[in-house]
Image (cartoon, grey):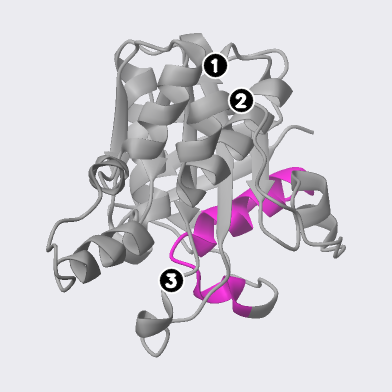
Amino acid sequence: MTTVDVLGVGVWTPDFPTADAWASQCLVPRSSLQPKLFSGSLQRRASTLAKMTAIVASDAAAMAGFNLSEVNFVYGSALGELSIASEIVAAFQDPGGLPSPTAFHHSVHNAPLASISIAVGNTLGSAAVAAGNATSGAALLEAIGLLEDTAAEAIAVFCDEKIPEAFAPWRNFESAAAAIALGRTPHPARLGSLQFAPSGETTRLALPGDYLFHPCAPALALVRAISRKESFTIDAAGNGVLVYCPTP
């Protein structure tokens, strides 16, 4: 299988908290992170990345008609829980010298997926991917691989938060997350198709502000193209390209 169907999308940024707002580039009042998926202690303990992931995964699933307890997830994040990891390193400089056990628990790269799985009772397989600027393509390839294997439905999430101030000179970008719900071809409710090709030209990225410097900028641009019913091509982590074609 080199072609899969795109069935839903989700986006969250502080300036554009929905896929529609992201597609129209219409600024709205800054949105707080309050995912409906989490409640109680899970809501209180969830990290920023976990909350972002929950929001976009829920939105993509709702659009696709997926049950979150019955879908395979792929989580793509170039930097993972960098803020929490930085806090842990700083804790070793304190007199006590030990980080918070809760912080350590949430520092694991796939922790956001674990939070969602706990919230919805999902016991299916999932994957976490980190591939620098190639994270978008790598995560989509992983999701396509799941669909080629045993998965009937998959949601690929792309998420990185604004990095701590100490790292700002390296790269500065706003927090952002996106999700794409994928299914096996053919699907009657598809928004379009995503096809792998061994070679091809990628579409130039044109994103507002510092979102262009986000590690998952290709996925953010792809989701915007899907919402706008536009064709789009991104790099497949150096292994070819992924071509999106909207349904006529």
Give the structural element (helix, strand or loop) at label 3: loop
Q: Where is residue 215 in the image (x, y as percent from the top left)?
A: 43, 65
Q: Earlier in the sequence, mark 3 or mark 1?
A: 1
Q: Which residue is tagged 2?
A: 37
Q: Distance between the residues labelled 2 and 3?
A: 25 Å
Relative to 150, does residue 218 appear above or below in the rendering? Answer: below
Amino acid type of the residue that numbered disc 1 sits on in the rendered structure: Leu
Q: Check the picture and name the quadrant holding the C terminus.
A: top right
- Residue 41, given in percent of the width and then of the height, sits at 49, 28
* Residue designated by label 1: 68
Cα–Cα span, label 1 and label 2: 10 Å
SS at circle 1: helix
Q: Which of pointers 1 and 2 indicates the residue nearer the eye? A: 2
Residue 45 placement (x, y as % from top left): 45, 38
In the image, the segment drawn in magenta is 210-233
Does 241 appear in magenta?
A: no
Query: Residue drawn at (47%, 41%), measured in percent from left and top?
Result: 50
Residue pushed farthest front? 95
Q: Main secondary structure of the magenta part?
A: helix
The answer to whether the residues at label 1 and label 2 have Cβ atoms under 8 Å apart is yes
| Cα gap from disc 3 to disc 1, whole angstroms | 29 Å
Pointer 2: residues within 10 angstroms few (<14), some, or many (20+)? some
Task: Kindly identify the amino acid type of the residue bearing the numbered disc 3.
Answer: Ile
Q: Mark 3 points at which residue?
A: 163
The answer to whether any part of residue 125 appears in the image is yes
Give how far across and how far down residue 167 sits, in percent: 35, 81
Q: Tell me what residue is drawn at x 48 percent, y 64 percent.
A: 201
